Every structure is written in structure tokens, then in C-alpha cells.
Image (tube, rainbow, N blue to C red):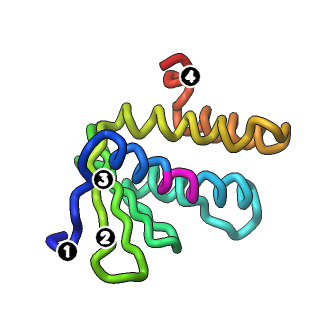
């Protein structure tokens, strides 16, 4: 990971997490319950690690399957060398932003809202509704 710059400052940290989640949530809502399609969020919560074709990766820490998740590492590799970034978030920061992104991307479409609600329930994100 020595090639990664670590995100710094609240604004930069927020941008990296929001950008990464916006891509994943958009695709996962689009491909939700489509036969043969694996959702990035399903893979992440199942394997504690997942990547997206847009060069975004998520890793839960610690990575032992029976351990509670304390932190989430988000990394991004741009096509241009030198534009790599990585940041560490608490699971609560990640969970709240994931909940907010699911709600944001489904607010004007009842079908997408139903899909988002199922994902929120599946990954137990409802506790972040009033944060």
C-alpha cells in the first residue's frame, strides 16, 4: 500500500467515502435481484472485502469472519498513476454514509426505495436512520 496517499482532512475523507459509495450503491440498486449478478455490498458483507470495476475497494477490519467489524478501509486507484488514495473509517462512519447514500439514490423512485429498504434491512443499517 505504499503507493497510496492517505486521504486527509474531513472534506477529503468525506469525498472519498461518498464517491466510492455512490458508485457501488448506484450499481447495486440497478442490479438488485437480477439473476447472475453479484452485488458489491453482498460480497463485501460476506467476504469482508470487495472491489468494484471503477477501481474502488473496501475492506472490513479486522478481517476474521467471526469478529465484529471495527474499521473500513476504502481505497481508490485512478487510471492515472499517482492518483491512488486510501482512508480508514470507523464502521459507524461507513454505515451511516452507506445508509444515507441508499436513501439519497432512492428518494424519487418507489422501486429503488423498495430495493434500498431491503438492503438497509439485510445489512442492519436501520440504526443509522436518525444519526
| Residue 112 on the magenta span | no
Seen from the viewer's position, the closer of residues 48 and 101 is 101
- Which region of the structure is painted magenta? 19-24
Q: Find numbered disc 4 in the image and state the secondary structure of the residue it sits on.
A: loop
Image height check: is 48 above or below 111?
Answer: below
Give the Cα distance between marks 4 and 2: 32 Å
Outermost right residue: 110
Q: Residue 72's spot in the image, x, y percent?
A: 32, 47
First along the sequence among labels 4 and 2: 2
- Answer whether labels 2 and 1 touch (C-beta < 8 Å): yes
In the displayed structure, does residue 81 sit left or right of residue 35? left
Q: Which residue matches tag 4?
A: 129
Image height check: is 28 above or below 79?
Answer: above
3 or 1: mark nearer the eye: 1
- Answer whether labels 4 and 2 touch (C-beta < 8 Å): no
- Provide the major secondary structure of the magenta segment: helix
Amino acid at each position: 500500500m505504499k503507493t497510496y496517499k492517505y486521504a486527509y482532512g474531513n472534506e477529503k475523507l468525506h469525498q472519498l467515502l461518498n464517491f466510492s459509495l455512490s458508485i457501488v450503491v448506484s450499481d447495486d440498486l440497478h442490479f438488485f435481484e437480477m439473476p447472475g449478478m453479484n452485488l458489491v455490498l453482498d460480497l463485501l458483507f460476506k467476504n469482508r472485502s470487495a472491489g468494484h470495476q471503477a477501481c474502488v475497494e473496501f475492506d472490513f477490519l479486522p478481517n476474521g469472519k467471526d469478529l465484529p467489524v471495527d474499521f473500513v478501509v476504502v481505497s481508490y486507484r485512478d487510471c492515472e498513476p499517482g492518483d491512488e488514495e486510501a482512508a480508514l473509517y470507523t464502521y459507524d462512519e461507513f454505515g451511516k454514509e452507506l445508509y444515507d447514500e441508499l436513501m439519497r439514490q432512492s428518494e424519487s423512485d418507489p422501486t429503488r426505495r423498495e430495493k434500498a429498504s431491503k438492503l438497509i434491512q439485510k445489512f442492519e443499517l436501520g440504526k443509522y436512520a436518525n444519526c
